[in-house]
Amino acid sequence: MLSHVLLHRGTRYLWNPAILEYARPATVFKAGDVVRIRGVSKEVAEKLQSEHGGINDSMKNLLGKEGVVKDASTASKIRVVVDSTSYVWNPALLLYLRDGPAPA
């Protein structure tokens, strides 16, 4: 398995890629991106969603699942489709996985 070398303040660290996450700033999310809604606790999700439209029980059931960005025209509110249902999420709850086809 390949390892990743990361530099921090002049020190080299060798990391197993299985423990690394690839993150992009919210302003880079675009329609079609495949993302994972972070599998945080419901309490953390409630706090992060408090100024992003709130969170309901259906949204809480989506924590940890993959979805596709439908709209990212506002950097602070990203609309994601999971299982044919879309909700607006705080970008701090989203983990970029890969580019995907642009949604129809």
Image (cartoon, rainbow, N blue to C red):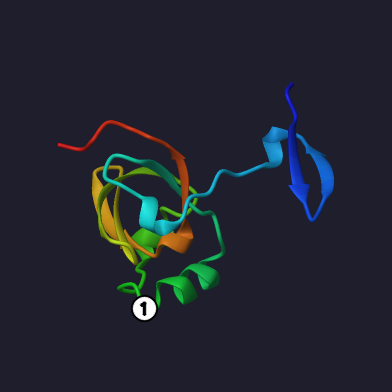
Q: Quadrant of the C terminus?
A: top left
Vertical comparison of 65 with 43: above or below: above
Q: Residue furthest top?
A: 1
Tell me residue 42's x, y (percent): 51, 67
Vertical comparison of 40 with 5: above or below: below
Tell me residue 50's x, y (percent): 40, 78
Residue at image location 82% in from the left, 51% down from the top: 10
**99 sits to left or right of 16:** left
Name the foreground residue: 53 vs 33: 33
Q: Residue furthest left?
A: 104
Q: Quadrant of the N terminus?
A: top right
Name the foreground residue: 85 vs 18: 18
Q: Residue furthest front?
A: 10
Q: Amino acid at mark 1?
A: Glu
**59 sits to left or right of 16:** left
Number of dots carrying numbers: 1
Name the foreground residue: 49 vs 8: 8
> What secondary structure is marked by label 1?
loop
Tell me residue 29's x, y (percent): 36, 50
Residue 18 lies in quadrant: top right
Name the foreground residue: 52 vs 31: 31
Residue to which mark 1 is pinned: 51
**96 sits to left or right of 14:** left
Query: Is the residue marked by circle 1 packed among few (<14), some (14-19), or many (20+) residues within 10 Å?
Result: few
Residue at image location 79% in from the left, 56% down from the top: 9
Residue at image location 36% in from the left, 78% down from the top: 51
Tell me residue 57's x, y (percent): 37, 65
Residue at image location 37% in from the left, 57% down from the top: 27
